[in-house]
Image (tube, rainbow, N blue to C red):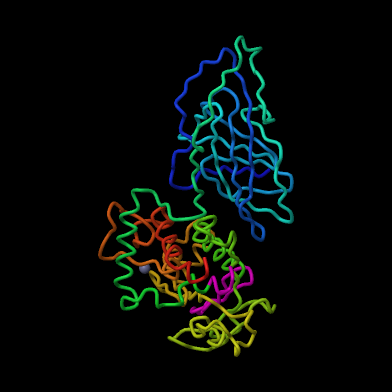
Amino acid sequence: MKRAVLTAGVAAVAVAAGIGTTVVAQAAAAGCRVTYSVPSQWSGGFTANVSITNLGDPLTSWRLTWAFPSGQSITQAWNATVTQSGSQVAAANMSYNGSVATNASVSFGFNGQFSTTNTSPTSFAVNGTTCTGSVTPTTGAPTTAPPTTAPPTTAPPTTPPPTSGWNPPSNLVQPLNEVWTHQEQTYNNGNLYGFRNYGWDQLLANRGYINYCVRWDSSASVTATQRDQIHAALQRQYKKWMDVMVGHNNWPYTDVPVRVVGWAVRDRAQLQWSDTSVDIYVNNIRENAPQCSEPCGRFFNQGGTYPNCPGGAARHYDHSLWLTAGFGGGAGGDWGQRVGSEYFMGALNSDNIHIFLHELGHTYGLDDFYDWTPTGQCCFIMKAGSASTITEFDKWMFRDWWRHLKSRYGY
Ligand SMILES: [Zn+2]
């Protein structure tokens, strides 16, 4: 059984501050009303907002439970810690929003996935009491009338979900600004925005997938199994960057498929498969290495059409994965990523192929940090050698690119 634990992603902003009235109940009374809304939905995904109104005694903690009617699953939540087991979901308060006064409300939100239909749940319970919109005593009859408190005179504050806007943790604001300013000054002769072939441009042009061609710059042979392992590793590593964006600031994709559409080799006999699942380019030597067909490459066709690609536009490739025997370190850019073939093959099952992750960061515009360090940051994957995983700072630098480029794509 699948069991996922999800926590609020980012900036913690207090919600539903108490309304300043203390009522001592003679007996606990419980009651609640839940509003569930889906303000946005797209193919296979949705954002939901949930508002709980506490009609009973003041709560110091809450746990909302429900069942999804049509197989939905939650991918990211904010202002609640969400656990899911099958269709059963429980959302518990964060440290900052557990207290809910009588007649006050608290809200949280999440992004989810569905396959065919997205039927909203209709029955909810708070701390085990089904929300009926009325109040029931939970510990015997009250000896006095249930306390009533005037409803708040202003609407409870709601926290916008991180799906919109820009809300990095406060300690990252300054270093992120330093990085962006530095990039604006140094990229493309001071014309960062004039460059139109960042990974972002490529991914958005495809509406959400990436195609690769492998430049096999080695005399070693490759089995079909190794070919498929390389593809799987690419998909897994790519997902680490793409997951940074899911649900953030109108990012339109929940899942970015990575396909390998071609292989380039010196000698066809090195590739030990006979199926036609990938296009194979033989002995097209550029930069002293096998190159995939240039009419199929995004780098050579930045207008995004591929009229002379032998396999057609569907076999165009956005990035090259250039694997070079005996190559130490790496290189990355809008053309793709280059790392040592021995390194990559040795890391196929690694959780983090960190040199590759760093180079893929470059494809999406992220800079190197050889000669300076943003304030307060020591270690992150784009500072080569200082981290082997994508850190929170890396994630926000990545999101900052989307913040600055998204208007290009109509977001
Ligand atoms: Zn680098």
Q: Nearer the viewer, residue 215 or 261?
A: 261
User: Is 164 within the magenta?
Assistant: no
Vertically, is 156 above or below 150? below
Q: Quadrant of ligand 1?
A: bottom left
Vertically, is 59 above or below 301? above
Quadrant of residue 46 within the rendered picture: bottom right
Q: Position of residue 308 (x, y in %)?
A: 60, 90
Which residue is farthest top?
143
Quadrant of residue 360 within the rendered picture: bottom left
Residue depicted at 51% across the width and 76% down the height: 320
Residue depicted at 51% across the width and 26% down the height: 60
Residue depicted at 60% across the width and 87% down the height: 309
User: Is 214 within the magenta?
Assistant: yes
Residue depicted at 56% across the width and 76% down the height: 221
Vertically, is 321 above or below 311? above
Q: Position of residue 136 (x, y in %)?
A: 67, 21
Q: How many marks?
A: 0
Q: Position of residue 131 (x, y in %)?
A: 67, 31
Q: Nearer the viewer, residue 170 or 202?
A: 170
Q: Position of residue 87 (x, y in %)?
A: 70, 42
Vertically, is 15 above or below 262? above
First to last magenta residue range: 203-226
Q: Quadrant of the N terminus?
A: top right
Quadrant of residue 312 within the rendered picture: bottom right
